[in-house]
């Protein structure tokens, strides 16, 4: 089988002292058995089994006082590991959004990660508009999309923000909406937004996945694992079952992310 370069464009890491507790909490929320330990070392060990070249890593501030600590943690991790690409986090209650965004950029972080459910906001909340305004034209936002029990991260809500901030680059996780793929097809497919493949292919019908990829455009799809929810070998195996050419696989596995984030392998 051909060996591909790989950028995992969706991976979580946590400080060692809280990693186990954080992973357990996420697993309880989604009702699944989590795979990995949540530390940088565990991430790299998992990815090494399939020769992952780079990992886009992030963590989310569930409380405003966590923002600077998390951004410092991610910045420190990327300074110690050349294989890591870092995204920072912001929060709607932050007093100086512009100041922290400038600091995120100065730390060498390449984007922002947001999670509506964990950060207690709906994508189109008025309180979130200052965040989007600050980030527009500066960094991409990787945003969790979709929930089986809530509508706070629905594709319909994301479209409203995209229309208001047309220069804002979004990466809509989980094919544009975990468990909301029909809504993603209706509202997001074909629009100027990136999708990642994370936490989807274990449940999403492969024919529907291919339909989304082809209709949306190969150049706007990024491979992601959502580690530590899933091990890298399992997620890669699922992805390689999709009926794609090797050229298309290369685009999704690394070339699209390399271009978007201006990174080299």
Image (cartoon, grey):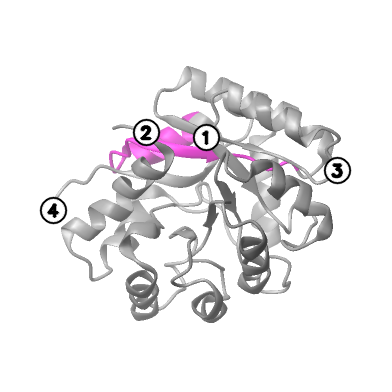
Mark 2, residue position: 263
- Label 1: few (<14), some (14–19) or many (≥20) C-alpha neighbours in 10 Å: many
What is the CA distance from the residue labelled 3 to the residue labelled 1? 22 Å
Quadrant where the C terminus is found in the figure: top left
Classify residue 143 by image quadrant. bottom right
Q: At which x and y percent is residue 80?
A: 48, 18
Of marks 4 and 2, which one's residue comes earlier in the chain? 4
What is the CA distance from the residue labelled 2 to the residue labelled 3? 32 Å
Contact, mark 2 vs mark 3 (Cβ under 8 Å)? no
Q: Is residue 44 left or right of residue 165?
A: left
Q: At which x and y percent is residue 243?
A: 23, 71
Classify residue 252 by image quadrant. bottom left
Of marks 2 and 3, which one's residue comes earlier in the chain? 3
Residue at the spot 69% in from the left edge and 49% down from the top edge: 132
Q: Which mark is residue 173?
A: none
Mark 1, residue position: 110
Mark 3, residue position: 93
SS at circle 4: loop
Of marks 3 and 1, which one's residue comes earlier in the chain? 3
Residue at the spot 44% in from the left edge and 46% down from the top edge: 9
SS at circle 1: loop
Of marks 2 and 1, which one's residue comes earlier in the chain? 1
SS at circle 3: loop
- Label 2: few (<14), some (14–19) or many (≥20) C-alpha neighbours in 10 Å: few
Contact, mark 2 vs mark 1 (Cβ under 8 Å)? yes
Contact, mark 3 vs mark 1 (Cβ under 8 Å)? no
- The magenta stretch is 41-61
Mark 4, residue position: 1
Of marks 4 and 1, which one's residue comes earlier in the chain? 4
* Pick the front one: 259 or 165: 165
SS at circle 2: loop
């Amino acid at each position: 089988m051909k060996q591909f370069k790989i950028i995992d464009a969706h991976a979580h890491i946590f400080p060692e002292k809280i990693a186990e507790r954080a992973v357990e909490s996420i697993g309880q929320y989604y009702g699944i058995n989590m795979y990995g330990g949540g530390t940088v070392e565990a991430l790299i060990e998992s990815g090494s089994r399939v020769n992952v070249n780079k990992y886009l890593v992030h963590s989310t501030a569930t409380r405003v006082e966590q923002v600077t600590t998390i951004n410092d943690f991610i910045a420190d991790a990327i300074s110690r590991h050349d294989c890591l690409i870092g995204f920072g986090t912001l929060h709607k209650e932050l007093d100086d959004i512009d100041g922290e965004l400038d600091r995120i950029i100065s730390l060498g972080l390449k984007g922002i990660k947001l999670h509506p459910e964990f950060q207690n906001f709906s994508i189109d909340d008025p309180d979130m508009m200052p965040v989007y305004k600050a980030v527009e034209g500066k960094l991409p936002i990787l945003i969790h999309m979709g929930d089986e029990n809530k509508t706070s991260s629905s594709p319909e809500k994301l479209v409203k923000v995209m229309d208001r901030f047309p220069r804002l680059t979004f990466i809509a996780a989980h094919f544009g909406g975990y468990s909301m793929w029909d809504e993603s097809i209706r509202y997001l497919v074909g629009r100027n937004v990136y999708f990642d493949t994370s936490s989807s292919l274990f449940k999403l019908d492969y024919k529907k996945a291919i339909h989304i990829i082809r209709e949306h455009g190969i150049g706007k799809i990024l491979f992601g694992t959502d580690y530590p929810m899933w091990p890298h070998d399992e997620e890669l195996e699922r992805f390689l079952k999709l009926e794609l050419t090797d050229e298309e696989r290369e685009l999704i596995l690394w070339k699209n992310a390399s271009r978007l984030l201006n990174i080299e392998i």
